[in-house]
Image (cartoon, coloured by chain):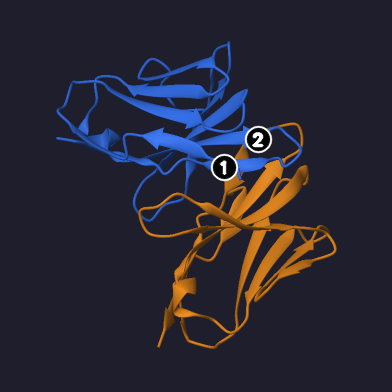
Chain colours: A orange, B blue
Amino acid sequence: RKEVEQDPGPFNVPEGATVAFNCTYSNSASQSFFWYRQDCRKEPKLLMSVYSSGNEDGRFTAQLNRASQYISLLIRDSKLSDSATYLCVVNIRGFQKLVFGTGTRLLVSP
Amino acid sequence: GAVVSQHPSRVICKSGTSVKIECRSLDFQATTMFWYRQFPKQSLMLMATSNEGSKATYEQGVEKDKFLINHASLTLSTLTVTSAHPEDSSFYICSARDEGPQGGYTFGSGTRLTVV
């Protein structure tokens, strides 16, 4: 079983739509959670950290459910520029490295 | 914010040759850097953790004699792909952790290696 699992998609949505991505992690020692965005042939860039209480940054909302070991990302009012792969990333307690999910591809069309 | 510079961005080499990739933290010191490899349509896979002044820690299945890592200073780590083969063609990305108050993982822009 993969440590971090995501639906690879692609999710095809029209501009203005709301879309949600889910991610599950298997290691209960996971302590820090992130969503990264990766454009084609580019490096990943931090979109937002995910906190237990949930957090919002503009059109983006992240939620964490530790009991279910589940993380989500909600994007409201999708823009064409949101088209990218969204990576669910976890840091495990006692380890410095990050563990990446396979990513969910989003395609926003006009 | 923290910046990590990675060079070269793209390299084509012949089978059997070696290629060195550099990763520099420009405005912070990084005692630990990470090297990832990403094949098309796949996620980043950690290859090794590079520790300043000591040996790198390799992930299971990664050949340490083939992927040589040197982290001689707090701002520079290098990955050398030795005796490259076409199956080593991939996107290699480094990352460094800013251990200062701002903290966070910053990625280099990646190196696309093609072995012909």
The one of A11 and B18 positioned closer to us in this rendering = B18
Chain bearing tag 1 is: B
Q: Is residue B116 above or below residue A37?
A: above
Q: Are marks 2 and 1 in contact (CB under 8 Å)?
A: yes
On the picture, is B44 further left or further right than B110? right
On the picture, is A26 further left or further right than A2? right
Point 67% across, 33% down: residue: A96
Q: Is residue A5 above or below residue B11?
A: below
- Going from N to C along the chain, the mark reached first, 2 or 1, is 2
Q: Is residue A20 above or below residue B110?
A: below
Instruction: Report the residue marked by disc 1.
Output: B106
Point 69% across, 43% down: residue: A91
> Please, what secondary structure does the residue beneath circle 1 have?
strand
Looking at the rendered structure, the kind of residue marked 1 is: Thr
Looking at the rendered structure, the kind of residue marked 2 is: Asp
Q: In the rendering, at what x and y percent does residue B41 appear?
A: 38, 56
Q: Dot 2, crowdedness within 10 Å: few (<14), some or many (≥20)?
A: many
Q: In the rendering, at what x and y percent does residue B103 appear?
A: 70, 40
Q: CA distance from mark 2 to mark 1?
A: 8 Å
How many labels were placed on the picture? 2
Point 72% across, 45% down: residue: A27
Q: Quadrant of the C terminus of chain B?
A: top left
The one of A87 and A61 positioned closer to us in this rendering = A61
> Please, what secondary structure does the residue beneath circle 2 have?
strand
Q: In the rendering, at what x and y percent does residue A26 appear?
A: 69, 50
Q: Quadrant of the N terminus of chain B?
A: top right
Q: Which mark is residue B98?
A: 2
Point 26% across, 36% down: residue: B87
Q: Which mark is residue B67?
A: none
Q: In the rendering, at what x and y percent does residue B86 appear?
A: 21, 35
Q: Quadrant of residue A55?
A: bottom right
The one of B89 and A60 positioned closer to us in this rendering = A60
